[in-house]
Image (cartoon, rainbow, N blue to C red):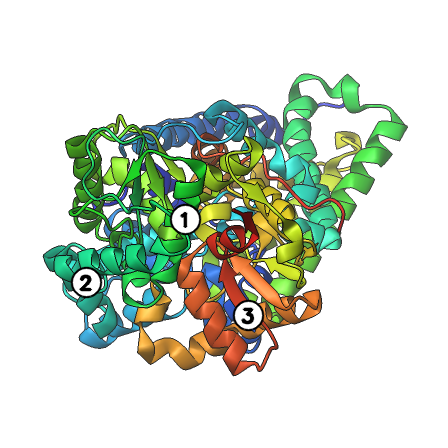
């Protein structure tokens, strides 16, 4: 803990006055109003009591008075694991409504890291982290599988787009496109759609045969070393290929990890500019490099702000501008932007099946938000959100589809 | 001018100075302690139209802009309580300095009445906060003995401030003595309790704002149409 607590974390651990302003701002609390253990301040206290016991001198002098307590048994470790992995998606909504500026999401991640350090974590978290350490991506996708998928998508597009090519390891490209392994495993059409957009925009682009995964489980399990290694693979690829810019496909945590946190974990200043594909697509539309017809997406559409993009990276307006350009009926859900509620798939929740019933119960808040829009399509810019939204739409029997921005842009393109 | 008893003279003067020096010393140590933790550096290139300084300024001012915090916007009564309570505390601190050193400034009956109303309302706000802490299950779950003690102590102090505000030692010095003894106790107790949150506040908000400003999150963009 001494190694992990920096000044920002220390202040968040010290500054909470237990005012309860965060309580009814958390989707877990709203879905479980009778269980006070879901309150962000309560969850924070489970970590804070360790800090008070081991680092804060008031906790050493009068532990019972300030609520300081260390962990002595396996049961207590399990309880802490249940709190930090199973009752919080690190969505940061509570951090942004705290009058004191307590950033619970940050020190919840820190607590996850401490538990991972001593080998205490949900089985799914251990499995995914292992894949990312050993195979370079979260979904155990082998290099051959990845390259075959790119070839397959290229073949699929050949008839429609003359001369379309998905370049791999092209040196000196203007854009290095990094993706989520979920796209290879479950949704390769997004790769094809992105390729078509790059093709029509006349982009000088490439993908990398190594370091192509922009996702990063280090953000979820609190392991900065994994975070540094995973992000470092992509930085190395960009450097090796001499790419002028890295474009990160739609993924909240992947963008945040690669663009924002990765340089901090790797303790390295990255010289290559990095941007979300949302910006790239928007620039193509603004600059007229691709022509779009919003009438091609005529169903009512709403937008779900991924927590990592809205609350940690400030990306709220660009997706809306893009949506208004490619859809004819865009409706806001309420609340939105940085006040939006989590889809419940954040913080690696989709990999922790033991907490699925809890997650789906808390998803009732999101379901209600979605239902109120009357939209037929919910668009998001994150693969984790896609999975969580599909799950909750099925669970709460909503008549909706989930799409990514790339799906809509591709569909709206005039060839 | 009515002659003060030696005890009240001591309580208003040397006791306050000694306890203030004590509090300041502990705060110096606390700030040194805060600064002994390494400040994390955000290495990412700036994003969005904002910047770290703008974000930090916005973050520090959010408390005065309740519309920027959903928690305040949705509970405007709680925000009003917060303002009234903290204003009362601030006025009481100021009064503890004015009575011994510039009593003429709070001599006018209108000023005394204004102070008493402010202290009374602040004590009432404190009482509401205490009731919420006791009656609300989720508040009970997060409350430590320090939380209960601090709010009780502040309510008592605010009530004693209201009684002491006329500053009429000639009609009995007990009220003033109680007020200054409580103030002295506060000055010693505060650095060790949650009441010292105001020391952490600027730091916590500064660092959060700096990071979120650098990343283009602060100042927040809201959907004003809704």
Question: Which class describes the residues within 10 Å of circle 1: few (<14), some (14-19), or many (20+)?
Answer: many
Q: Say the numbered circle drawn on residue A196.
A: 1
Vertical relation: A108 (above or below) B63: below
Q: Residue B20, image x and y in percent?
A: 49, 27
Answer yes or no: is residue B164 visible: yes
Q: Please tell me which of labels 2 and 3 falls first in the chain.
A: 2
In the rendered view, tell whether residue A12 sits above or below residue A370.
above
The subunit carrying tag 3 is A
Left or right of B91? Residue A38 is: left
Residue sitting nearer the eye, B72 or A215: A215
Pinpoint the chain carrying mark 2. Answer: A
Question: Which of the two discs, 2 and 1, labels the residue nearer the N terminus?
Answer: 2
- Distance between the alpha carbons at the discs numbered 3 and 1: 22 Å
- Determine whether label 3 and label 1 are within 8 Å by CB: no
Residue picked out by circle 3 = A401
User: Does residue B160 show up?
Assistant: no
The residue singled out by tag 2 in the image is A141
Marks 2 and 1: which is nearer the front? 1
Tag 3's secondary structure? strand
Quick check: do tags 2 and 1 share a chain? yes
């Amino acid at each position: 803990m001494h190694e992990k607590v920096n000044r920002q974390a220390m202040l968040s651990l010290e500054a909470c006055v237990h005012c309860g302003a965060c309580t009814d701002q958390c989707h877990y609390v709203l879905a479980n109003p009778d269980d006070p253990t879901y309150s962000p301040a309560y969850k924070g206290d489970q970590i804070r009591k360790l800090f008070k016991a081991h680092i804060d001198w008031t906790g050493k002098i009068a532990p019972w008075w300030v609520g300081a307590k260390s962990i002595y048994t396996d049961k207590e470790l399990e309880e802490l694991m249940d709190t930090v992995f199973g009752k919080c998606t690190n969505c940061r909504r509570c951090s942004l409504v705290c009058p004191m500026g307590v950033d619970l999401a940050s020190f919840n991640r820190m607590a996850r890291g401490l538990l991972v350090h001593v080998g205490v974590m949900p089985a799914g978290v251990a499995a995914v982290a292992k894949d990312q350490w050993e195979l370079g991506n979260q979904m155990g996708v082998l290099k051959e599988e990845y390259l075959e998928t790119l070839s397959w998508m290229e073949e699929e597009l050949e008839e429609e787009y003359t001369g379309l090519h998905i370049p791999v390891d092209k040196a000196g490209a203007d854009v290095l496109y990094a993706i989520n392994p979920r796209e290879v495993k479950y949704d390769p059409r997004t790769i094809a759609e992105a390729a078509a957009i790059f093709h029509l925009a006349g982009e000088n682009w490439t993908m990398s045969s190594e370091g192509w995964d922009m996702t990063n489980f280090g953000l979820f399990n609190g392991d900065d070393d994994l975070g540094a290694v995973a992000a470092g693979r992509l930085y190395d690829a960009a450097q090796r290929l001499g790419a002028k810019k890295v474009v990160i496909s739609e993924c909240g945590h992947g963008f945040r990890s690669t663009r924002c946190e990765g340089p901090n974990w790797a303790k390295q200043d990255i010289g290559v500019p990095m941007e979300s594909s949302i910006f790239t697509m928007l620039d193509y539309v603004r600059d007229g490099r691709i022509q779009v017809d919003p009438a091609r997406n005529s169903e009512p559409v709403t937008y779900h702000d991924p927590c990592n993009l809205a609350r940690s990276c400030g990306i709220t307006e660009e997706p809306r501008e893009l949506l208004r350009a490619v859809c004819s009926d865009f409706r806001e859900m309420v609340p939105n932007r940085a006040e939006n509620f989590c889809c419940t798939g954040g913080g690696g929740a989709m990999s922790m099946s033991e907490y699925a019933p809890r997650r789906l119960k808390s998803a009732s808040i999101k379901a209600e938000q979605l239902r109120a829009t009357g939209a037929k399509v919910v668009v998001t810019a994150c693969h984790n959100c896609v999975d969580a939204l599909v799950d909750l739409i099925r669970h709460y029997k909503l008549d909706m589809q989930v799409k990514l921005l790339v799906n809509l842009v591709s569909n709206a393109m005039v060839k | 001018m009515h002659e003060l008893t030696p005890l009240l003279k001591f309580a208003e003067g040397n006791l306050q100075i000694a306890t203030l020096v004590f509090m300041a010393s502990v705060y110096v140590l606390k700030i040194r302690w805060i600064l002994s933790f390494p400040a994390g550096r955000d290495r990412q290139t700036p994003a969005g139209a904002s910047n770290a300084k703008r974000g930090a300024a916005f973050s520090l001012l959010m408390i005065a802009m309740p519309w920027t915090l959903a928690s305040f916007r949705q509970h405007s009564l709680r925000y009003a309580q917060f303002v009234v309570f903290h204003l009362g505390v601030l006025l009481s601190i100021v009064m503890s300095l004015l009575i011994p050193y510039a009593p003429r400034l709070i001599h006018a009956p209108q000023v005394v009445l204004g102070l008493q109303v402010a202290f009374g309302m602040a004590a009432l706000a404190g009482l509401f906060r205490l009731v919420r802490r006791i009656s609300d299950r989720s508040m009970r779950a997060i409350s430590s003995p320090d939380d209960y003690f601090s709010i009780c102590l502040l309510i008592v102090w605010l009530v004693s401030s209201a009684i002491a505000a006329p500053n009429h030692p000639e009609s009995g010095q007990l009220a003033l003595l109680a007020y200054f003894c409580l103030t002295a106790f506060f000055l010693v107790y505060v650095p060790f309790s949650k009441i010292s949150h105001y020391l952490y506040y600027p730091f916590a908000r500064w660092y959060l704002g700096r990071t979120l400003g650098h990343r283009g999150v602060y100042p927040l963009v809201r959907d004003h149409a809704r």
